[in-house]
Image (cartoon, coloured by chain):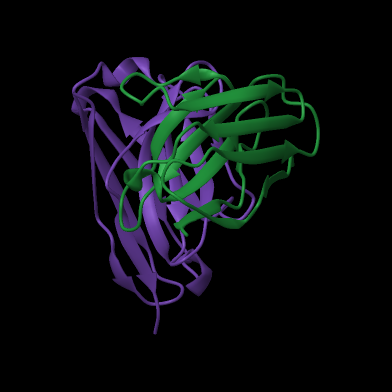
Chain colours: A purple, B green
Amino acid sequence: EVQLVESGGGLVKPGGSLRLSCAASGFTFSSYSMNWVRQAPGKGLEWVSSISSSSSYIYYADSVKGRFTISRDNAKNSLYLQMNSLRAEDTAVYYCARGYGSGWDIDYWGQGTLVTVSS
Amino acid sequence: DIQMTQSPSAMSASVGDRVTITCRASQGISNYLAWFQQKPGKVPKRLIYAASSLQSGVPSRFSGSGSGTEFTLTISSLQPEDFATYYCLQHNSYPPTFGQGTRLEIK
C-alpha cells in the first residue's frame, strides 16, 4: 500500500523558514517523480513543485520560485521542501504527492501538513 | 500557463441523479487530464486519469470523457458518499494546473 507521511509543518513568522519532509513507503520511491501541492484554507489545490526520480529535473510554481527548494533522498525514501522567506499567502496544507507517468500527473497523496505564516 | 475552468462551481443534486461536471482548458491538452474527489477534511483521491481511464477501486458509476480542450466527469447515479468537491488537473505542460473545483452538495 502506498503511504506518504508529511511532517514539519507549524507556525512560523513572516520571513521565516521551515522544512517539510515526506516519508514514502509501499512502492519503489526511486522510480517515481514526486510533487508538493498546497491548499490554502477553504481554497482550491495549487501545484507547488516537482522533482524527477533521479532529481535531474526540478520545477517550481512562479509563486514560490527562488524561495522554496525541493529535494529528495532516494536512500531514505524521503522528499523534502525547504521553504524560506515565508509569506502570509504561503499559509496552507502542504501535500506530498506521487507522480504518475512521465509528466506531472499525480496519483497518490499524503495526509498533508499545515503551515501557518503569521506574526 | 494553461487555465482550467470548471463548471459549475457549485451544484446541488439528489441521490440517484445523473451529474456532469465540465472542465475546459484554455488550450489543447490532448488527454492529459485527471479528476480528483476531495471530501471535507480529507485527502484528494484520484478518480480518473488520462481523461477517461477509471482509477483502480473507483466505482464504475464514475466516468470521464473528452480530449483537447473540453472534458467531462459524469456520475451516473449519485450516492450519499459522492457529495464532495471535484477538481480537474491538466498535466500536459508546465506548470500543471488545477480547476477551481466544483462543490457537489445534497439537494
Position above or below: A57 against A13: above
Against B59, residue B86 (above or below) is below
Quadrant in which residue A108 is drawn: top left
Which quarter of the image is occupied by the N terminus of chain B?
top right
Q: Residue at x 36, y 26 (%)?
A: B59
On screen, residue B6 versus residue A86, left or right, reads right
The mark tally for this picture is: 0
**Residue A2 falls in image quadrant:** top left
Place of residue A43 in the rendered image (x, y in percent of width and height, measured from the top left): 51, 62
Image location of residue A95, percent across then percent down = 36, 47
Relative image position of residue A47 (x, y in whole percent): 53, 45
- Residue drawn at x 40%, y 70% is A16
Q: Residue at x 62, y 56 (%)?
A: B9
Query: Which of the pair B28/A117 is nearer the observer?
Result: B28
Observer-nearest of A109 and B34: B34
Q: Given the current orientation, which residue lies at the most extreme right position?
A: B27
Rendered location of residue B57, percent (x, y): 30, 22
Q: Is residue B47 left or right of residue B69?
A: left
Q: Residue at x 45, y 46 (%)?
A: A37
